């Protein structure tokens, strides 16, 4: 029967070494798991940039091509899409993501019902009515933030404002 003697090295790891490695692996997973869960889902800033870019494109199309374009918001489904009037060109419905929700739509100071699909029209000649889209971001960790997307009627650009901004200061 072999016994350990001083000065000899044993093969394998001690219980303390294994415990430290498992603790570090658990810590890494604990920090990374929330981020891994959101992979493949559009982030708030990506959605805002996409809406802003498409809004300016829709405005330019209506201004230069003299064709009506629409931003179609579907609050119950949590999606949006752009469409050229007449149905010839329609972008696929894009999700807002599980964290973003539309909490209000206001066109020319008139609130729209959230249980219906709403169309924001970019009229031929580059005309659009003043529009605000109110969103809530249910961020990680349970904190929520409200955002307002203000569509500028003069150039179709989108301003992203923190909070629910009903009127300009």
Image (cartoon, grey):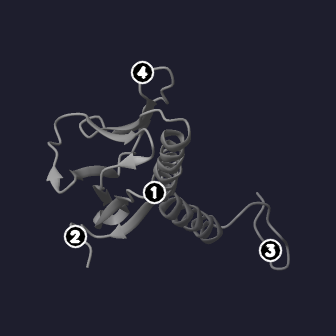
Tag in front: 2 or 3? 2
From the top left corner, tell me how far across and down residue 36 is, in percent: 52, 51
Residue 158: tell me if it is visible. Answer: yes
* Alpha carbons under labels 1 and 4: distance apart: 43 Å
Tag in front: 2 or 4? 4
> In the drawing, what numbered circle is on residue 167?
2
Nearer-N-terminus badge (3/1): 3
Residue under label 1, please give it. Answer: 34
Q: Pointers 1 and 2 in contact (CB under 8 A)?
A: no
Residue under label 3, please give it. Answer: 5
At a point 51% along the width and 45% down the height, the residue shown is: 54
Tag in front: 3 or 1? 1
Q: Which secondary structure, mark 3?
A: loop
Residue 40: tell me if it is visible. Answer: no
> In the drawing, what numbered circle is on residue 94?
none
At a point 16% along the width and 37% down the height, the residue shown is: 115
From the top left corner, tell me how far across and down residue 59 is, in percent: 48, 46
* Alpha carbons under labels 1 and 2: distance apart: 36 Å
Tag in front: 3 or 4? 4
Q: The C terminus lies in which quarter of the figure?
A: bottom left
Q: Nearer the viewer, residue 148 or 144?
A: 148
> In the drawing, what numbered circle is on residue 86?
4
Please indicate whether residue 71 sits to the left or right of residue 59 in the image: left
Q: Which secondary structure, mark 2?
A: loop
Q: Which secondary structure, mark 4?
A: loop
* Alpha carbons under labels 2 and 3: distance apart: 82 Å
């Amino acid at each position: 029967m072999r016994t350990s003697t001083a000065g000899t090295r044993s093969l394998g790891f001690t219980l303390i070494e294994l415990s430290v490695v498992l603790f570090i692996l658990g810590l890494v997973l604990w920090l990374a798991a929330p981020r891994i869960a959101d992979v493949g889902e559009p982030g708030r800033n990506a959605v805002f940039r996409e809406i802003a870019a498409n809004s300016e494109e829709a405005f330019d199309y209506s201004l230069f091509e003299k064709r009506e374009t629409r931003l179609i918001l579907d609050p119950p489904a949590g999606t949006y899409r752009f469409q050229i009037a007449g149905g010839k060109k329609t972008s696929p419905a894009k999700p807002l993501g599980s964290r973003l929700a539309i909490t209000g739509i206001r066109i020319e100071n008139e609130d729209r019902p959230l249980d219906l699909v709403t169309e924001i029209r970019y009229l031929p000649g580059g005309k659009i009515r003043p529009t605000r889209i109110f969103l809530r971001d249910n961020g990680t960790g349970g904190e929520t933030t409200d955002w307002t997307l203000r569509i500028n009627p003069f150039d179709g650009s989108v301003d992203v404002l923190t909070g629910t901004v009903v009127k300009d200061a």
